[in-house]
Amino acid sequence: MTPPTRTRVLTGITTTGTPHLGNYVGAIRPTVQASRDLSTDGFYFLADYHALIKCDEPARIQRSTLEIAASWIASGLDPDKVIFYRQSDIPEIPELTWLLTCVTGKGVLNRAHAYKAAVDKNNAAGHDPDSDVSAGLFMYPVLMGADILMFKAHKVPVGRDQIQHIEMARDMASSFNHLYGEHFVLPEAVIEASVALLPGLDGRKMSKSYDNTIPLFAPAAQMRKQIAAIVTDSQAPGEPKTTEGSTLFQIYQAFANANETAAMARAYTDGIGWGDAKHMLFERIDREIAPMREHYQSLIDNPAHMDKILLSGADKARQLATPFMRELRHAVGLRALSLGSAAPVAKEAKTALPSFKQYREKDGQFYFKLVDSKGQILLQSLGFASAKEAGQTIVRLQSEGPDVLADLQPILEFAPQTADFLSEVLTLLKAHNAASQK
Ligand code: TRP
């Protein structure tokens, strides 16, 4: 395995709802900011397979996927600078989920918070412990492990409730690596401590499940109305007010800078009326959101364009996932029967591996071929003018793996029916090459 040298940051968002201000402050805004760090590679995806665990309304899944994708882009995520994709566009994800399922203890999944909470609730109600619990909910952490491990993510920004899942992904990676060789990177959770937990209209955490949210891109008039509905106490204008425990103040703080926040605190002491405070809050939020609202609407109005963006992201993602999955299939023994039992790639396989032979023909040109241990020719090059060119092409085939096949097709000859086999051989050679350079 060649570990990526640049830090990879990956996170997913489940597509079941309409993004609200809490999502924006807690996840979208900090993630978009982090995505601008040019020293890291960002992977951001719409976790629509995860959505199926909680939601059986097809229209809602589809609508939410569009809304969340549009929210991220309107908030500044640049799909040309990161890999932005939809989980269900990557067939390798469910494929990897199965391999990981087979190295994950059932007992470990029994202890996953979301599953345990469902069981506890059933027990408390006197129901069967697994009543209404789908196997999908039970398997949730494995699917998430596949999301993360597929792209060798180093850092995974998540909320606190997700830390356990990242730890499980690490365990899956370790178990797999222990059994089959070093293939996976062990990921780490990143918890952004400075990110505000936004209270909702009623003062509890802003969350879909409490029905106390303010949609991020609601029309301005609706947002104004909802802000007016934030619960306050009955203190009259002129009475000094305390910022502590004030929902309104907390939301204001999440959008304002230090000076603005200090000014609002003074206004509280000076007895600002709730109506005026709400007006200031609306103005402050709208100043940040209004410029993005139009972009959001244009994205929502053009879903075909969004499909294109997401498919192009999936394309980039699969350029990594497809060869990696091939490597993993090979590692567990799902491989061509004719390939011998080339056990651990780096060690015993050495003698059994096909190798390149370089030679010169009577025409004065330089050639090479890839020959297996029994002398069968797998691949034959056309003539090169110099030995150096032929040599460089061999190096590419050895180090870049099967992806170069398409590139080099015009100067190579091989039977089309051996293309898959050849890909597998090149994946092996690449892994072997990387291992021997360590
Ligand atoms: N389970 C995450 C959540 O609900 C979403 C998610 C799915 C995710 N796959 C992921 C987050 C992989 C980070 C990495 O918040």
Image (cartoon, helix red, strand yellow):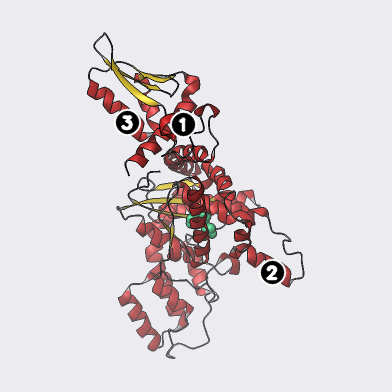
Dot 2 crowding, Cα within 10 Å, few <14, some 14–19, many 20+:
some
Q: Position of residue 333 (x, y in %)?
A: 54, 37
Evaluate if marks 1 and 2 touch, with contact meaning CB atoms under 8 Å apart: no
Q: Position of residue 406 (x, y in %)?
A: 39, 27
Dot 3 crowding, Cα within 10 Å, few <14, some 14–19, many 20+:
some
Tell me which amino acid carries mark 3.
Arg
The residue indicated by pointer 3 is 396
Tell me which amino acid carries mark 2.
Lys
Depth-wise, is mark 1 or mark 2 nearer the camera?
1
> From mark 1 to mark 2, how far is it between C-alphas?
48 Å
- Image quarter for residue 337? top right
Q: Is mark 1 within 8 Å of ligand 1?
A: no
> From mark 3 to mark 2, how far is it between C-alphas?
57 Å
Q: Position of residue 17 (x, y in %)?
A: 56, 58
Which residue shows up at 52% across the image and 63% down it?
164
In the image, 49 versus 207, the foreground residue is: 49
The residue indicated by pointer 1 is 424
Q: If the image is split into quadrants, where does the C terminus sit?
A: top left
Which residue shows up at 60% across the image and 66% down it?
209
> From mark 3 to mark 1, how far is it between C-alphas?
15 Å
**Mark sitting on residue 363:** none
Q: Earlier in the sequence, mark 1 or mark 2?
A: 2
In the image, 402 versus 79, the foreground residue is: 402
Task: Give the vertical position of 33 relative to 342 (above or below).
Answer: below
Does residue 67 appear anywhere in the picture?
no
Evaluate if marks 3 and 2 touch, with contact meaning CB atoms under 8 Å apart: no
Q: Position of residue 222 (x, y in %)?
A: 51, 65
In the image, 293 versus 211, the foreground residue is: 211
Which residue shows up at 64% across the image and 65% down it?
116
Q: Earlier in the sequence, mark 3 or mark 2?
A: 2
The residue indicated by pointer 2 is 121
